Image: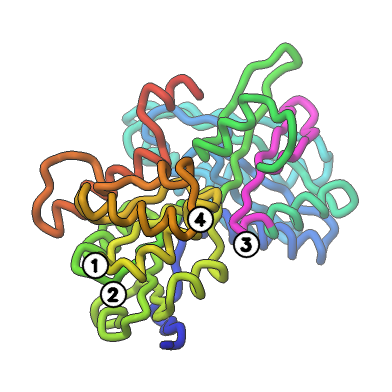
Amino acid sequence: MAKSTVPASNAPSPTAAARDEIDVLKAARDWMARDGRVAIATVIDTWGSAPVPTGGQMVIGTDGRFQGSVSGGCIEGEVITEAEEILESGKPKTLTFGVADETAWRAGLPCGGQVQVFVERLDAKTSGDLLAKAVKAREGRQGLVVRTQLDDGSKRVYERTDANMPDDIADRFSTAKSQLKETPDGKVFLHALVPPARLLIIGATHIGQVLAQIAKLAGYEVEIVDPRTAFASSDRFRDVTIHAEWPQDALPKLGLDPYTAVVALSHVGHIDDEALKLAVKSPCIYVGALGSSRNHAKRKERLTAAGITAAELARIKSPIGLDIGAQTPAEIAVSVMAEVVLAVRGTKREAAAAA
């Protein structure tokens, strides 16, 4: 059995937004441990072409240093000035920046728009556990939703496994979208601190090569699992993490969480089957397998004999990908990626209903 191969240059790389969020949380945790308090600025609403999405954050230390971004422009200067006052007073504040097209560039909004930024002070006594939990959840790909009452900054933290979760909180876990809401008690911000979607490709095939490139361009984390070292090589998959192992050895170590999609593309029964046995019993968001209807019928016989239930078999999308008449490896990769995106994001109608 080949040993897992993860070249240093092939280390996994989250999307820029996710990476910035992780860095902000870690910086806030570390600076708070050092100074006892920090200010956090969070984008709670946007309109128009705001370069930082809702949920984007910046941390400001007591010494004036900052990390992260809320606009990419000179809004940061005004936010930092306000943060310095809030670090002293402890009273949170919502800042609104409305920008016309002709003055958009001055405030970092490429084509005009509006940004609302909530600035608050966090101190070690009341918020140390929150930051530690948020960093741990991100590193463990678990996710949290933080509900903040804007008038006083009070918070409630939800984990995905919480019972009797309100529908609007559950929606944040599934859509990964943060949201500003009006409630009878005033405005609240639902901050979805969830990990970036991840695609595990079983089978370092030609289709897998193209799919890996497309998924990375779409901002997904991508990892390849294939015990065949001739296929699973860094020459064929540049800047992608490779695990030259059997799926039954690699997947338990990688973890199959609700933000992970598994696609079996090796077209070799004893490789794909081992991945599917684990994937269908996990909470992963998508499971797909390459092969014709005839091949899938045989696959289901093998998996049934291995103890997989009918309900678990029904989770496998096969033939894999949206039916767009794809024929070439590149076209098949596009159809697979489209089906994964649909599983992760849902339709526009579903997204509108959740908003």
Residue at the location (38% across, 47% down)?
A: 316
In space, the residues marked 2 and 3 are separated at their CA atoms by 25 Å
In space, the residues marked 4 and 1 are separated at their CA atoms by 32 Å
Marks 4 & 2, CB-CB < 8 Å contact: no
Callout 1 secondary element: helix
Q: Nearer the viewer, mark 4 or mark 2?
A: 4
Magenta segment: does it hold 158? yes
Mark 3, residue position: 139
Percent position of residue 63, x then y: 73, 61
Tell me if residue 320 comes above or below residue 102 in the rendering.
below
Mark 4, residue position: 307
Marks 2 & 3, CB-CB < 8 Å contact: no
Mark 2, residue position: 237
Tell me: 205 left or right of 62. left
First reached walking from the N terminus: tag 4 or tag 1:
1
Q: Amino acid at mark 4?
A: Gly
Counting other residues with Cα less than 10 Å from the Cα at mark 4, is it few (<14), some (14-19), or many (20 or more)?
few
First reached walking from the N terminus: tag 4 or tag 3:
3
Q: Amino acid at mark 3?
A: Glu
Q: What is the residue that sits farthest to the top in this orientation?
A: 184
Q: Which residues are magenta?
A: 137-159
Residue at the location (70% across, 57% down)?
A: 28
Marks 4 & 3, CB-CB < 8 Å contact: no
Percent position of residue 36, x then y: 85, 58
Tell me if residue 335 comes above or below residue 132 in the rendering.
above
Mark 1, residue position: 209
